[in-house]
Image (cartoon, rainbow, N blue to C red):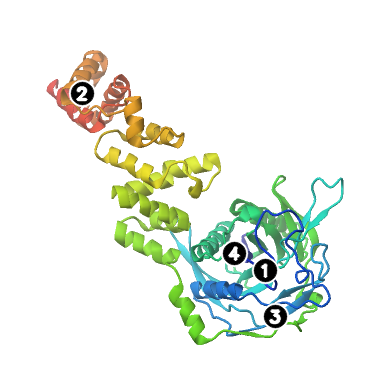
Amino acid sequence: MEWEIVIGLEIHVQLSTQSKLFSGASTRFGAAPNTQACAVDLAMPGTLPVPNQEAFRFAAMFGLAMNAEIGRRSVFERKNYFYPDLPKGYQTTQLERPIVGPGVVEIHLEDGSSKKVRLHHAHLEEDAGKSLHEDFHGMSGIDLNRAGTPLIEIVSEPDMRSAAEAVAYLKKIHSIVTYLGISDGDMSQGSLRCDANVSVRLQGEEKLGTRTELKNINSFRFVERAIKVEAERQIDILEDGGHIVQETRLYDADKNETRSMRSKEVANDYRYFPCPDLLPVVLSEDYIEQLRNELPELPDAKAERFQSEYGISAYDADQLTQQRASADYFEAVCKTCHEPKLAANWIAGELAALLNRREISIQESPVSAQQLAGLIIRIKDNTISSKIAKQVFEAIANGEGSADEVIEKRGLKQVSDSGAIEQMVEAVIAASRAQVDNYRKADESKRPKMMGYFVGQIMKASKGQANPQMINKVLKEKLDALL
């Protein structure tokens, strides 16, 4: 049987406001537990919520960036449920009239294809607190610092058909909110979290299967793994004649499996009703138009500009613009060295590998944009070869200084003196009589490949510092003269 996976994502994005959605308490990350939750956040008697204007501005900016409908009149409801980290007993959220309506986003996949994913809506709501399960001698602790922090919950339509598509969509949303500056998008700190609704159905069927919700996944890699393993679990059950239970499940990264958390609630279970303490929020046309004019250059527009302005491929442009920091880094390198293709290759290659090894972001890169540009300049003017450049790059990353300083200190300057290279070529030919005889006897079509042996010996003799182009030129002349 051929199965099709159907995926929809609910992405929770903490907004980078200085204070909470309905109170003046700080949203700063890292404070001691329970030091940033005030009486309003806990709904103590006699308190009233006051909406944070900045949160509405950020949410509307997101909607405009998604080409979505903006709710001119949005309303808050109370979503009632009990959980230890929700002392109010309800969450103030939006249901019937969210601030952002339907929209669409285009995602790009590794095979070069693209796909449009529909946005159902995005609504404003307050975050809950956090349950802590470590170092409490078998008990759990509650930290309410996060309670009341403004969120937008971004709900997609079930348009994704693979884990790869889901990750591409999640990355695109991450890219948009960080470009806008409305969230830092730090998944490790919970600034961006993802719930994945996953179901399977036979190929060709139109009716959706029973879905499960994978809750609070906090990395791109775990989203992909969780969806894959949950889809496999559901397929195994159905092929064995069983049925899927609608429920909320957790992903265990250590065991690479999902496990049941609770039965899946529906809207009626939450007893939604209009919040009696908050009036509808109305956004004027002038206000929305002002926000539209203030939007920064977004990833798709930046990628198009990179292709036209720098002459790089669509793939390179897409990779470079996924993060605003990497796009800024690329432009800073190009401003100094004026070699966009080389810059794109080094950022996607050596620099990306370095950052992955050290598990750091490009903002923390030990190789600055100016240092990488200096290295590229020395490659282009033939001061060093591409092979030696990798050694220089590692030295820069280890704090040994600029490319020029490393090259000078280590004596890595490329040998481009024709007389010196000619001597090395002649020495290798004289020491390789058998290989020379084979070269002379070989068909002309095979000789270019056979030259690799001689080039390797010459590079070894020069400790990698001989100019490869000059080696090939002189070597071919010398060998052809022996034919």
The nearer-to-camera label among 2 and 1 is 1
Residue identified by numbered label 1: 20
Residue identified by numbered label 3: 76
Q: Gap between marks 2 and 1, in whole Å?
A: 69 Å
Tell me the SS state at disc 3. Answer: loop
The residue at 51%/82% (across/down) is: 287
Q: Gap between marks 2 and 4, in whole Å?
A: 60 Å
Q: Residues within 10 Å of mark 3 (few under 14, many from 20)?
A: many
x, y (%) of residue 279? 69, 85
Q: Quadrant of the C terminus?
A: top left
x, y (%) of residue 102? 56, 78
The nearer-to-camera label among 3 and 1 is 1
Q: Quadrant of residue 247?
A: bottom right
Please report whichever mark, 2 or 1, sits nearer to the chain's N-terminal start: 1
Residue identified by numbered label 4: 16
Q: Is residue 207 among the parts visible in the rendering? A: no
Q: Gap between marks 4 and 3, in whole Å?
A: 20 Å
The front one of 13 and 96 is 13
Report the amino acid beneath label 1.
Lys
Please report whichever mark, 4 or 3, sits nearer to the chain's N-terminal start: 4
Residue 374, placed above or below residue 455 = below
Residue 257, placed above or below residue 25 = above
Residue identified by numbered label 2: 421
Q: Gap between marks 2 and 3, in whole Å?
A: 77 Å
Q: Quadrant of residue 280?
A: bottom right
Residue 316, placed above or below residue 8 = above
> In the rendered structure, are the residues bearing label 1 and label 4 in contact, judged by CB atoms less than 8 Å apart?
no
Left or right side of 348 for 95: right
